[in-house]
Image (spheres, rainbow, N blue to C red):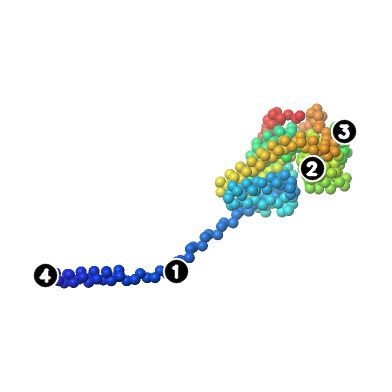
């Protein structure tokens, strides 16, 4: 028993110490730590888009609708701001602005930059297409050919392209036969239309489309060639008396984006941009096909003398232009032959009416 006493004493001391520790009052709770600040929302990527059409024009409105869809689909991560007309850059400078990144996206006709590379304007070679249906059917097939050119030479990607109808004669003088071209002074908005004018017997001066109204009003030129929608939207109908429908060349607009901006996008965002721009392109193709006949009716209602060139007469005009067409396509080598193959295919489906 005496031997166990020291052991018992040690046990008692240990137990007492534990009980004493448990009986101590818990320390008063300190202040609740402040929650960590929420991360600041990431600013959206802003892309600037230039389009030649003025505010309120359907070409500008459709870009505003495109912008809203892309913002929604990217949950606000990407926003497109629309700059119509020449608010952000002069129209002749659009291509270079996108190339350098001064502007991220353009929605404009490729043909006006054909002087920088003839491949850019190849789809607007005169008499290449028989009408708006053929042109609309060709757009998706033309896109990859042009995309390669823009990526290799101009630091941009072509996202989508659509027809804007035909280039028709809009004039202060009646043009119904080849003889009517003699002495006609035409404001040509691209090199292809300047060549067409000269071959048919007229004289051309290169005029930016934004200056057509003033030139016609002052009598500096007798005529121009542009789309019927463009003529109405820019009020050329106030200063012309005649329109000759002959589908001398196709008009088109296309979306190009700076290649560095494109490569910086996540793959899912790239897919959204492709899907939405091509959705817009399809809608516009369908719209311009529908508007062809509607525009003729509207122009007549404005008091404009509208003449649809008969098939046989158009064939005579096209025959005169054929050597130029061949020269242009052959000069582009394999690229030109691919363009011709596409045109031949769609023209067979949609002959001139």
Indicate the secondary structure of the residue bearing disc 3. helix
Closest to the camera, between mark 3 and mark 1, is 1
Quarter the C terminus occupies: top right
Q: Which residue corresponds to mark 2?
A: 232
Quarter the N terminus occupies: bottom left
Residue shown at 82%/44% (left/top)? Answer: 236
Marked residue nearer the N-terminal end (1 or 2): 1
Marked residue nearer the N-terminal end (3 or 1): 1
Indicate the secondary structure of the residue bearing disc 2. helix
Residue shown at 66%/39% (left/top)? Answer: 282
| Mark number, residue 1 | 4
Q: CA distance from mark 1 to mark 2?
A: 72 Å
Marked residue nearer the N-terminal end (1 or 4): 4
Residue at the far left in the pictured view: 1
The spot of residue 231 in percent (x, y) is 79, 42
Mark 3 burial class by Cα count in 10 Å: few <14, some 14-19, many 20+: few
Indicate the secondary structure of the residue bearing disc 1. loop
Q: Which residue corresponds to mark 3?
A: 179
Q: Which residue corresponds to mark 1?
A: 31
- In this orientation, does residue 230 appear? yes
Residue shown at 68%/43% (left/top)? Answer: 254
Q: CA distance from mark 2 to mark 3?
A: 27 Å
Q: CA distance from mark 3 to mark 1?
A: 96 Å
Mark 2 burial class by Cα count in 10 Å: few <14, some 14-19, many 20+: some
The spot of residue 17 in percent (x, y) is 26, 71
Marked residue nearer the N-terminal end (2 or 3): 3
């Amino acid at each position: 028993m005496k031997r166990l006493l020291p052991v018992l004493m040690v046990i008692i001391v240990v137990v007492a110490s534990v009980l004493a520790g448990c009986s101590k009052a818990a320390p008063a709770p300190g202040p609740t730590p402040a929650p960590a600040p929420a991360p600041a929302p990431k600013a959206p990527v802003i892309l600037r888009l230039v389009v030649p059409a003025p505010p309120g024009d359907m070409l500008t409105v459709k870009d505003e609708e495109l912008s809203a869809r892309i913002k929604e689909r990217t949950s606000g991560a990407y926003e497109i701001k629309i700059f119509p007309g020449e608010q952000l850059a002069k129209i002749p400078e659009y291509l270079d602005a996108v190339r350098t990144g001064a502007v991220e996206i353009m929605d404009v006709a490729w043909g006006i930059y054909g002087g920088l590379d003839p491949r850019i304007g190849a789809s607007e070679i005169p008499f290449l297409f028989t009408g708006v249906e053929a042109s609309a059917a060709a757009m998706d097939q033309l896109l990859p050919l042009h995309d390669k050119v823009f990526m290799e030479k101009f630091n941009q990607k072509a996202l989508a392209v659509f027809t804007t109808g035909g280039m028709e004669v809009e004039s202060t003088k009646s043009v119904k036969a080849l003889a009517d071209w003699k002495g006609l002074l035409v404001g040509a908005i691209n090199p292809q239309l300047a060549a067409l004018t000269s071959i048919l017997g007229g004289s051309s001066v290169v005029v930016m489309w934004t200056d057509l109204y003033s030139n016609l009003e002052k009598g500096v030129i007798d005529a121009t060639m542009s789309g019927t929608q463009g003529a109405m939207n820019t009020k050329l109908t106030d200063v012309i008396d005649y329109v000759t429908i002959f589908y001398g060349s196709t008009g088109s607009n296309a979306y190009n984006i700076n290649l560095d901006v494109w490569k910086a996008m996540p793959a899912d965002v790239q897919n959204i941009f492709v899907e939405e721009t091509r959705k817009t392109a399809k809608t516009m193709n369908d719209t311009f096909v529908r508007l062809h006949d509607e525009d003729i009716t509207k122009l007549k209602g404005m008091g404009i003398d509208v003449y649809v060139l008969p098939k046989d007469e158009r064939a005579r005009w096209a025959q005169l232009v054929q050597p130029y067409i061949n020269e242009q396509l052959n000069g582009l080598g394999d690229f030109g032959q691919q363009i011709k193959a596409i045109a031949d295919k769609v023209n067979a489906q949609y002959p001139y009416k």
